[in-house]
Amino acid sequence: MSVLIVLDQSDNHIKKSAYEILSYGSQLAAQIGTTAEALVLGTVNDDLAALGKYGVSKVHQVNSESLNHVDAQLYTKTIAEAVAQTNASVVVFSQTHTGKSVAARVAARLKAGLVAGAASLPDTSNGFIVRKTVFSGKAFANISIQSPIKVISLNPNSVSVVTTDGTATVDQLSIALDASKIKVTAVNKITGEIPLTEADIVVSGGRGLKGPENWGVLLDLAKVLGAGTACSRPVGDAHWRPHHEHVGQTGVQVAPNLYIALGISGAIQHLAGVNRSKVMVVINKDPEAPFFKAADYGIVGDLFEIVPQMTAEIKKLKGIA
Amino acid sequence: MKILVCVSKTPDTTSKIAFKESNTQFEEAGVQWIINPYDEWFALVRAIELKEKDPSIIIHLVTVGGADCDPIIRKALALGGDEAFRINADSNDSFFIAAQIAEIAKQNQYDLIFTGKEAIDYNSAAIGGMISELVDMPYVSLATLFELNGTTATITREIEGGEEVAEISLPVVVSCQKGMAEQRIPNMRGIMAARTKPLKVVEPAAIDTLTSIVNFELPPAKAGCKMVAADNVPELIRLLHEEAKAF
């Protein structure tokens, strides 16, 4: 019996979402009286023993370059074998690109009930019930998993990272790997920007900015906050900003600690992509904009006057000249 | 070449979300039902575009649900599917649904299976990955571009912090999102033709469900938006920093 936590990596580093699921999996293991162990796939440059401070006693690695690209078929066989070797009863993923690619497939292979998009620790007082977001963040469902093995894929940014002073033992699992049927011909990483799904703060612009030439005020604010930049669907459709910045129902779904919406009215489809944000701030000249009903803080006014003042105030606060 | 497109019935994106029977069931009263947008706009339309280039391609549609799914299946046929299966079962368990679709897939030997990247009701993004395992095909999730050259597909997909381009020999299961295609509206000819296209109702295979919904909850109501005057920007920053501890 153990809780096996499958860690995301990209570019040979453990990702932020991985620390969240380490904390989550360790707390779950304590709750059900078992041990938490981590699984790392591919070659990673980080100190794996140090992952013990997030609560795991063991880190298992399958150290092969063929796992540096996420091939769901190859990953699934490898993870299922690791589950067998570690006798895991719960497998935890992060619902990131990698989790979305792999968790469900692993669940099907193990005939394990899946909760994808989990929002909090399971209730194990009577069965095994996991809360997840449904209807694009507009509601939660409590899902009971009945199978002996359970798979949980946790929404990023839904739990806080907890550290202790433990260290973990690291071992290499011996698992025979099939050849991948997917031939990767190019990888294009977006450089110089903070990936939206990993950003703690997101600054997002809508039609209220009136045109792509006006984005400077938004970019300045994002820069002082170390924020990712996003936009509404009309802005993406008009090619004012690149498509990968479009957040909303049909775009990227984000859940940062702080979401700042500039000149976005807050259509229900937009809110569906951002409503898991912890704090939402709206700047809009229209006091009737529906976004004010969903937001935590708001200013009615001209964003071209307000946003530069916000940037200046934050600079002052952070001591940036 | 045969393509299977999986479609799901979901509430319209503007639907009010409410529950009944002590929060154990979704309140369907007043809800408009649509084809899950990812299934329709990206998976189905891309399959139709492939068929427009190569008319020998056959597009099958599949959904798991009761007779109330027939209108959305007819709409998908009107857009351009050739034939549809409705597996006559009602379930919210991803494994049950995927295993039913996998049964259809095994009987018909598809070269390509398309799903939307997720359904907008349960947001699990699970069906494509599960089907791929059950039929033992490669799986490419979150695809934004799909090109076919003979029996080799070139697929661009979203990965952490960017995108990846890969070549795969068919068959393959692909989950589709924005970029794959553009939304279309069915024309009158398509709507007329859809009336006579085959919609086969299939009884479900004996599959165990692995999960069940205990109940639903609505998020706690927001405390309300704290408004700050436009001439008092420093107060907004102070609140964000000290009260919300947002940065």
Image (cartoon, coloured by chain):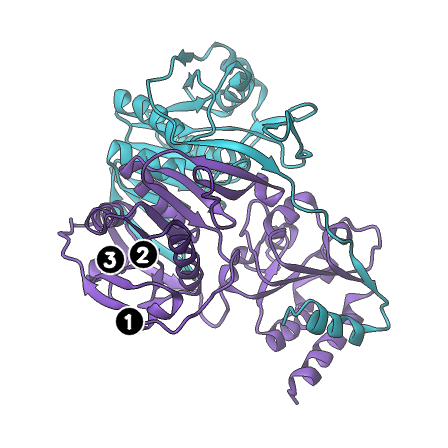
Chain colours: A purple, B cyan
Question: What residue is at 81 percent from the left and 65 percent from the top?
Answer: A302
Question: In which chain is the residue bearing label 3?
Answer: A
Place of residue A97 in the rendered image (x, y in percent of width and height, measured from the top left) = 41, 52
Which residue is labeled 3 in the image? A67
Which residue is labeled 1 in the image? A49
Q: SS at mark 2? A: strand
Q: Nearer the viewer, mark 2 or mark 3?
A: 2
Q: Residues within 10 Å of mark 2 (few under 14, many from 20)?
A: many
Disc number for residue A226? none
Task: Measure the alpha-carbon separation of dots 1 and 2.
Answer: 16 Å
Place of residue B191 in the rendered image (x, y in percent of width and height, measured from the top left) = 55, 17
Q: Are dots 1 and 2 on a single chain?
A: yes
> Tag 2 or tag 1, which sits nearer the N-term?
2
Quadrant in the picture for the C terminus of chain A: bottom right
Which residue is labeled 2 in the image? A35
Q: SS at mark 3? A: helix
Q: Amino acid at mark 1?
A: Ala
Q: Quadrant of residue A140?
A: top right
Question: What residue is at 54 percent from the left and 59 percent from the top?
Answer: A242
Question: What residue is at 52 percent from the left and 43 percent from the top?
Answer: A131
Q: Quadrant of residue A226?
A: bottom right
User: Between B39 and A240, which is closer to the camera in this rendering?
Assistant: B39
Question: What residue is at 44 percent from the left and 23 percent from the top?
Answer: B63
Q: SS at mark 1? A: helix
